[in-house]
């Protein structure tokens, strides 16, 4: 299913019918199979995926869904560990080829790595440097394994997988914001939602989805001002909450089993501006409790928040067959919720939606859940013309009081490193002369609910 979009992902209001016919006609003429895009150049072939992997190029007609992954994410392997490369390999080799031929989506393998500046959008400079030092020790043969925390370690292949995971996510976010895809599902590992700004945690090295979220706010700050991160992994997304807590322009919500690692995510957690919503679920909770939490508590809060883009930490370890937890969800629950989120994205954020794989440690159950998730993303309705024009967005719910975040006196009292740290927290560029940095920080406004 194809949708004419402009650079910012909005329908071109000035498109004539002949132009639309021309675009769609060209797509039909050039396509050699349902798997190709008319205006996309072919990339390298990967027979294991059963189709073409391509590098992103500018397109005039955007698909409703694209899948993003990279073989480099298979290289991280800790022996006898539940977060194994077989999780992703099973999806890449056994699940995606069948789905892609049936649903006609593209599989993209971006040749992209994050810069240190990209990583420092979320992670502290000290954490980034210590992680790179661990990479160097293993790469140079000085260590076989380096523990970043008690259950997250760097081994041969970790650097490639972690860096590829972050880079693939950044590219997917750019493609969605720039209108090259309406929705994206990012299949990378190791997962990321436990990684906090200053530490690794829970198998997670870099917080992939938060890096993508902050990148969207930085690069497209005139368009993507407010974002929502929704997490349905069975474990609380403590890394996402930590990176959203002090930022009113970031909304975080999670359902998760409690008590369970990481022993966080209290219902009383609210963030600095009521921008955090946690709905803990007790052991053995069923589909009904899960669906009620999202339908009646979280999604109404997202609708009220009116984000410009929605991100999803898509962990599937709440399934009843998963060995690491004790909730009783089935694959249809993930289809149900994904469809709800996609429809809400149409309503509040021009359909912009990026989901990133997190947990899920029974391969068969993971495959069924990912199938349900992708089917919902591919089959959800496209935004209507009224939604693309913003006519369905509530202006009442997004009433804001705008004031300067810092006074000129406060900024003048800051040294260069402090200003850079504040800009990094806001997802803004940190390079430039001191006077330019002061002007940049001085232009930041604080949005607060009336």
Image: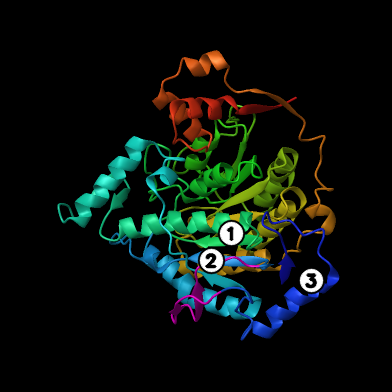
Residue 175 location, quadrant = bottom right
- The reply to whether dot 1 and dot 3 touch (C-beta < 8 Å) is no
Measure the C-alpha gap from mark 1 to mark 2: 8 Å
Out of 349 and 444, give the one closest to the viewer. Answer: 444
Q: Earlier in the sequence, mark 2 or mark 3?
A: 3
Is 419 on the left-hand or right-hand side of 383? left
Q: Earlier in the sequence, mark 1 or mark 3?
A: 3
Q: Which residue is mark 1?
A: 175
Q: Secondary structure beneath disc 3? A: helix
Measure the C-alpha gap from mark 2 to mark 3: 23 Å
Measure the C-alpha gap from mark 1 to mark 3: 22 Å
Q: Which residue is mark 2?
A: 56
Q: Secondary structure beneath disc 1? A: helix
Does 296 lie within the magenta span? Answer: no
Q: Which residue is mark 3?
A: 19
Residue 198 location, quadrant = top left
Q: Is residue 319 above or below residue 416?
A: below
User: How many residues crowd mark 2 within 10 Å: few (<14), some (14–19), many (20+)?
Assistant: some
Does 51 lie within the magenta span? Answer: yes
- Specify start and end residues of the magenta stretch as a single range: 41-59
- Label 2 or label 3, whichever lies nearer to me, is 3
- Name the dominant secondary structure of the magenta segment: loop
């Amino acid at each position: 299913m194809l949708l004419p979009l402009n650079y910012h992902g909005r329908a071109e209001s000035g498109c004539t019918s002949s132009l639309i016919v021309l675009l769609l006609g060209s797509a039909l003429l050039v396509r050699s199979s349902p798997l190709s895009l008319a205006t996309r150049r072919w990339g390298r072939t990967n027979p294991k995926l059963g189709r073409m992997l391509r590098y992103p190029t500018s397109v005039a007609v955007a698909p409703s869904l694209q899948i993003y992954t990279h073989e480099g994410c298979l290289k991280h392997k800790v022996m006898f560990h539940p977060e194994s490369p077989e999780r992703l390999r099973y999806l890449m080799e056994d699940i995606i080829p069948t789905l892609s031929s049936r649903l006609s989506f593209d599989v993209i393998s971006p040749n992209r790595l994050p810069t240190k500046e990209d990583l420092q959008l979320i992670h502290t400079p000290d954490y980034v440097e210590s992680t790179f030092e661990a990479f160097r020790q293993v790469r140079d043969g000085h260590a076989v394994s380096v523990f970043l925390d008690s259950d997250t370690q760097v081994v041969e292949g970790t650097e490639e997988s972690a860096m590829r995971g972050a880079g693939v996510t950044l590219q997917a976010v750019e493609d969605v914001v720039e209108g090259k895809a309406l929705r994206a599902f990012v299949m990378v590992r190791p997962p990321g939602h436990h990684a906090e700004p200053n530490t690794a945690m829970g198998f997670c090295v870099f917080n992939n989805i938060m890096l993508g979220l902050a990148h969207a706010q930085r690069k497209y700050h005139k368009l993507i001002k407010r974002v929502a991160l929704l997490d349905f992994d069975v474990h609380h997304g403590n890394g996402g909450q930590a990176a959203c807590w002090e930022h009113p322009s970031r909304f975080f919500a999670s359902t998760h089993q409690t008590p369970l690692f990481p022993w966080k995510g209290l219902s009383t957690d609210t963030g600095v501006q009521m921008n955090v919503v946690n709905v803990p679920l007790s052991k053995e909770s069923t589909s009904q409790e899960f669906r009620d939490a999202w339908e009646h508590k979280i999604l109404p809060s997202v609708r009220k928040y009116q984000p410009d883009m929605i991100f999803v930490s898509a962990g599937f370890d709440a399934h009843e067959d998963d060995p690491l937890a004790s909730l009783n969800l089935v694959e249809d629950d993930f289809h149900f919720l994904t469809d709800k989120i996609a429809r809400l994205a149409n309503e509040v954020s021009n359909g912009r939606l990026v989901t990133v794989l997190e947990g899920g440690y029974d391969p068969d159950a993971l495959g069924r859940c990912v199938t349900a998730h992708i089917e919902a993303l591919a089959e959800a309705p496209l935004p209507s013309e009224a939604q693309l024009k913003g006519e369905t967005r509530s202006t009442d719910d997004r009433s804001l009081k705008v004031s300067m975040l810092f006074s000129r006196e406060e900024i003048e009292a800051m040294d260069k490193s402090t200003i850079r740290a504040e800009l990094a927290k806001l997802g803004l560029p940190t390079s430039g002369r001191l006077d330019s940095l002061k002007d940049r920080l001085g232009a930041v406004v604080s949005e607060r609910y009336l």
